[in-house]
Image (cartoon, rainbow, N blue to C red):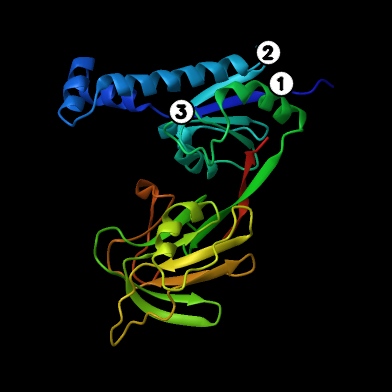
């Protein structure tokens, strides 16, 4: 029996120029908008041209007899990925985080369309390597890095997973009130919310929080089966404490939180508040290392 023809799914998002054009309608209006803010259309167009050149290089790297599809970031929740898809994420690092929760074991190749603009932690490869790496992926020869993800499950069965971190708190600037339990430690708290970060998230939001701590945590590596908890600005009062401000969660551990917020409590992942779970008074959420992992192509 012949091997199935691979399908390559190119995942991308609108460039800065395309987004501005969609918002303002015409290029002269885009130019006026940028110049009023001390920026130039030429610089935005150059970045756009590099992005389009990268997408063109990826398209040319896909063998003519392979199947192909393309999906933009806003459409990810409606796209049906196949188990054997080879995913090519072309964009900034955050695009891979947006994508990861929709996958279940598919290989992801991160292509950086603009090395002058994006760090490339999750999109480390230049467009020129796409052809070689796609061949390696299809042949099972690619070097894969399995990155840990974090999951949150409410007591009503709703759940989500994230690649960087999960946030629990109030959707406005009000204090979040909840009861927190980690291992044999438990505390009622009022804070600006908390995050539970993976090793991938340890290079972003968690890194900023950890750097401000008097006793910083040893953050996990991206492939470690471990998470880091950070409570943001816990407030001491006669009914709330601050002793449980952070800690590590291993593969067997879990964090349990009970909401004491009458309205506005939320749980969301990777900064995508629109894809949130409502966390009303009395609801329980369990946060732990996810079984799902991101399979990122390194070489």
Q: Earlier in the sequence, mark 2 or mark 3?
A: 2
Task: Judge depth for marks 1 and 3 and give the one in front.
Answer: 3
Give yes or no for contact between labels 2 and 1 (Cβ–Cβ under 8 Å): yes
- Vertical placement of 237 versus 272: above or below? below
As helix, strand or loop, the secondary structure at mark 1 comes to: loop
In this picture, residue 230 sits left or right of residue 290: left
- Vertical placement of 149 versus 133: above or below? below
Q: Earlier in the sequence, mark 2 or mark 1?
A: 1
Residue plotted at (47% across, 17% down): 53
As drawn, the label of residue 114 is 3
As helix, strand or loop, the secondary structure at mark 3 comes to: loop
Can residue 160 be seen here? The reply is no
As drawn, the label of residue 65 is 2
Residue 163 locus on image (x, y percent):
52, 49
Is 23 or 243 nearer to us in this picture? Answer: 243
Is 251 or 207 nearer to us in this picture? Answer: 207
Residue plotted at (56% across, 78% down): 183
Residue 241 locus on image (x, y percent):
36, 82
How many discs appear? 3
């Amino acid at each position: 029996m012949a091997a199935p023809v691979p399908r390559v799914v190119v995942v991308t998002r609108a460039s800065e120029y395309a987004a501005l054009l969609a918002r303002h309608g015409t290029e002269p209006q885009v130019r006026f908008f940028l110049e009023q803010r001390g920026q130039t259309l030429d610089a935005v167009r150059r970045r756009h041209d590099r992005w389009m050149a990268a997408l063109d290089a990826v398209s040319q790297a896909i063998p003519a007899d392979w199947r192909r599809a393309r999906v933009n970031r806003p459409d990810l929740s409606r796209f049906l990925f196949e188990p054997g898809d080879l995913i090519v994420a072309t964009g900034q690092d955050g695009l891979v985080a947006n994508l990861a929760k929709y996958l279940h074991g598919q290989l992801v190749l991160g292509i950086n369309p603009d090395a002058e603009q994006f760090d490339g932690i999750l999109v480390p490869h230049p467009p020129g390597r796409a052809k070689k790496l796609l061949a390696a992926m299809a042949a099972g020869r690619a070097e894969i890095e399995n990155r840990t993800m974090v999951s949150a499950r409410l007591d009503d069965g709703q759940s989500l997973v994230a690649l960087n971190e999960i946030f629990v708190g109030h959707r406005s600037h009000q204090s979040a009130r909840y009861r927190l339990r980690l291992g044999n430690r438990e505390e009622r708290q009022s804070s600006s919310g908390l995050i539970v970060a993976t090793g991938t998230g340890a290079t972003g939001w968690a890194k900023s929080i950890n750097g401000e701590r008097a006793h910083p945590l040893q953050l996990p590596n991206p492939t470690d089966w471990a998470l880091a908890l950070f409570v943001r600005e816990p407030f001491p009062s006669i009914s709330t404490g601050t002793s449980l401000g952070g800690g590590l969660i291993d593969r067997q551990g879990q964090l349990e939180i009970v909401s004491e917020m009458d309205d506005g409590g939320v749980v969301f992942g990777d900064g995508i508040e629109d894809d949130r779970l409502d966390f009303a008074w009395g609801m329980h959420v369990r946060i732990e290392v996810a079984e799902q992992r991101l399979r990122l192509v390194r070489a």
